[in-house]
Image (spheres, rainbow, N blue to C red):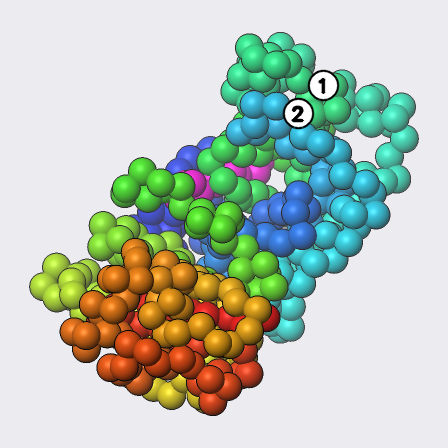
Amino acid sequence: MTDFLDDLAWRGLIAQSTDLDALRASMAKGPITLYCGFDPTAPSLHVGHFVPLLTLRRFQQAGHRPIGLVGGATGLIGDPSGRNTERSLNAAEVVEGWVERLRGQVGRFLDFDDPSNPALMVSNLDWTGELSAIDFLRDIGKHFPVNRMLARESVSARLAGEGLSYTEFSYQILQSNDFLELYRRYNCTLQIGGSDQWGNITAGADLIRRVEGGHVHVLTLPLITKADGTKFGKTAGGALWLDPEMTSPYAFYQYFLNSDDRDVIHYLKVFTFRGREEIEALEKAVAERPFAREAQRALAEDLTELLHGKEELDAVVAASKALFGQGSLEELPAATLGAALAEVPKADIPALGAPFIDLLADSGLVESKSAARRAVKEGGAYLNNRKITDEAYVPGAEDLLAGRYMVLRRGKKSIGGVEVS
């Protein structure tokens, strides 16, 4: 059986560690407790958070106890890591609402009913909110040499630029205190996080050593990049969110379905629970049959089901097929159809009455009305998967899907849409 940490390494999930051998020895003695923190800086987590969320899940499946920490306190402050400018502070009631939303999202990935190693969910406001300023400075702050804090990359980079407020400067101390509290309360001996959190996390390990004389572990995870140089998890519409109201399940599915051949195997290792043999078979398929996109479908289906459930996965797969003439458009739920058309060139019109060729051009599916006429003449223009051969055809109410949509297609692969408002 492959060692758990060796499997993480094979998946490319280990960026930095204080001492892997020591961590391996500790895990060999029995289950450990670990945690990862998630700050409420938006109403939803985004796809980049998948890496630590799924890593917590992997640890739990291996018999260890995960703690999901939502930053009810640190979210009021803001982490300076990776930022060139000061964060705008959000109102306390806004952060409180986001904390509850994030609790639900983090909770989807952990098992709180496991009889041997049930997961925990905590908010650092529970202990930070009770601290007085004097207690914070005397009991915690005195263990942080300022020269070391100034030397940390997240701090030094800001000092070389626009500067850093004391508020954000103190973030590292607050996060370190979280590790200390979880060590005291639950014997938590491992913190995981993104590689950009190395300084903050090791500061917490150092605080535990100074205050309690304890030895704990740190493991950071790589930040995901794309082979084409664009930022992972970014789309034309912005970030890829885990909340279905902010990123539809269809858009989420399509993002991973469109993964580059150079990225897809790495994504399968990082984001899915498929074993080495399955992934290596898909890697072979990418090399021998790239046109079939077997690996991309496996990735998109695994992640969509994991996040949104089997019912939503079935709906988006059906929509994806139906748009290209491989299923019934009429049977698609209105919400799924609307989400699908939001991802393609689309014309928004106030009422019916425009000729089909005008809709083709107005949607952006073709560059002009003359190009639309040409597509009709050549037999390559479709309305709701029905070939249109009459240049003068005017769609009517009978052509509307869910009472408001029409699906346009040029050739086999170019999809557009119309929405009647």
User: Which quadrant, please, contains the C terminus?
Assistant: bottom right
Regarding residue 80, the answer to whether it shows in the image is yes
Image disc number at residue 86: 2
Q: Are marks 2 and 1 in contact (CB under 8 Å)?
A: yes
* Residue 276 as seen in the image, left or right of residue 98: left
Q: Which residues are magenta?
A: 215-224
**Sequence-wise first label, 2 or 1:** 2
Residue at x-position 19% and y-position 74%: 377
Residue at the (57%, 65%) spot, across then down? 244
Q: Residues within 10 Å of mark 2 (few under 14, many from 20)?
A: some
Picture disc at residue 165: 1
The quadrant where residue 39 appears: top right
- 217 or 123: which is nearer to us? 123
Q: Position of residue 398 (x, y in %)?
A: 47, 89
Label 2 vs label 1, nearer the camera: 2
In the rendered image, the residue lying farthest to the left is 288
Residue appearing at x 31%, y 38% in the figure: 229
Amino acid type, callout 1: Ser
